[in-house]
Image: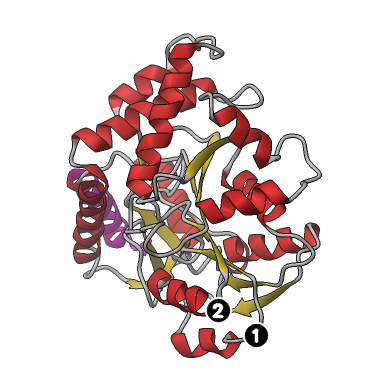
Amino acid sequence: MINFTVGPVQSSEKVRSIGAEQVPYFRTPEFSDLMKENEKLMKKFAKASDDSRVVFITGSGTASMEACVMNLFTSEDKVLVVNGGSFGNRFVQLCEIHDVPHEVIALEKGKTLTREELYKYDGMGFTGFLVNMHETSTGVLYDIDMISEFCKKNDIFLLVDAISAFLANPINVKEQHVGAMITGSQKALACPPGISVIVLSPEAIERIERNKVKSMYFDLQDALKNGERGQTPFTPAVAILIQINERLKEIEAQGGVESEIKRIATLAEDFRTKIKELPFEIMSESLSNAVTPLHPTTASAYDIFTTLKDEYEIWVCPNGGDLADTLFRVGHIGYLTEADNDALIHALEDMKKRGLI
């Protein structure tokens, strides 16, 4: 099986081997040292300041999205939310659940956020900005430099879900004045699902410290306090945190974040070049390196997903809802190679010969 989804993705042999080991006890100096190393490398790869902090939540990326909304904003805030797909809509839902006043920039699926659209909200007193750097459901990559400039001009706290963008596209938490950045273990970190990660700027830490959140598990004050000793408040997904440590050290040894982004970008470009002769349209105005969204012009997207899975042992990423039959996505993150791209292309060419696409 070759996995071209955007999470969970394929892992290296060493990362996989850790998952087969007995899970060690974690309230130890050794595990604390490992967690501090995880924090150090995450800050380095996110290009965060030395006085930033990193919190590791046992839960999916949505858990950290919710933790951020709960801990960083209150009913006194007024936030602007970009909603261009199912993950942008998730931020909208979280603001509704936690009574955070908000307005929505609603975008058509596959469309990017333009400067003209963004600056309609200039000078309107917003205190927070919530955006999925890469709207994974449609493959759209938003211009974080443009959004950062807008937020700096308006003194707005910027929360970025970089769950599928981190390590696939550049992000500089310090220079882009990102207040908090979220990612997850099962994306370009290429580990099993179960851990989400929040990189917190000093401004985010100040917001957390002055806010009393009504939650035990998602209290980031508690998480930060325990993190000082390299621990978590509750039992974490220990094995995945050890796998993350191995993966971060792999990236460091292979040239760091720039090298990893280049590797993923090369895979994406290789695939997009090879797909040109097949009956697909790339459905995004602004592409991430992480994924290529494809609209089949001659067949159902979901049927293509099913046939690849059942007859060729290749996973691509289907969509749900009104996009189920019109769009599927091919991921470029994880332990993939150009030879894997070739295998997918050959499968699609064979399906074309068979009259399936």
Q: Nearer the viewer, residue 14 or 304?
A: 14
Query: Split into 4 quadrants, where in the image is the C terminus?
Result: bottom left
Above-or-below relation of 234 to 150: above
Report whether residue 207 is seen: yes
* Residue at screen point 70% across, 40% down: 218
| Residue at image mark 1 | 124
Magenta span includes 238: no
**Rendered image coloring scheme:** secondary structure
Residue 102: quarter of image:
bottom right
Q: Residue at image x 30%, y 56%?
A: 348
Residue of label 2: 154
> What is the magenta range?
339-357
Comparing 211 with 159, the one in front is 211
Instruction: Please state the horizontal and vertical placement of residue 180, each as a whole percent of the image.
Output: 53, 54
Q: Point out residue 26 in the picture as x, y percentages from the top left corner.
A: 54, 14
Give the quarter of the image for residue 289: bottom left
The residue sitting at 47% across, 17% down in the picture is: 31
Sequence order check, earlier mark of 1 and 2: 1
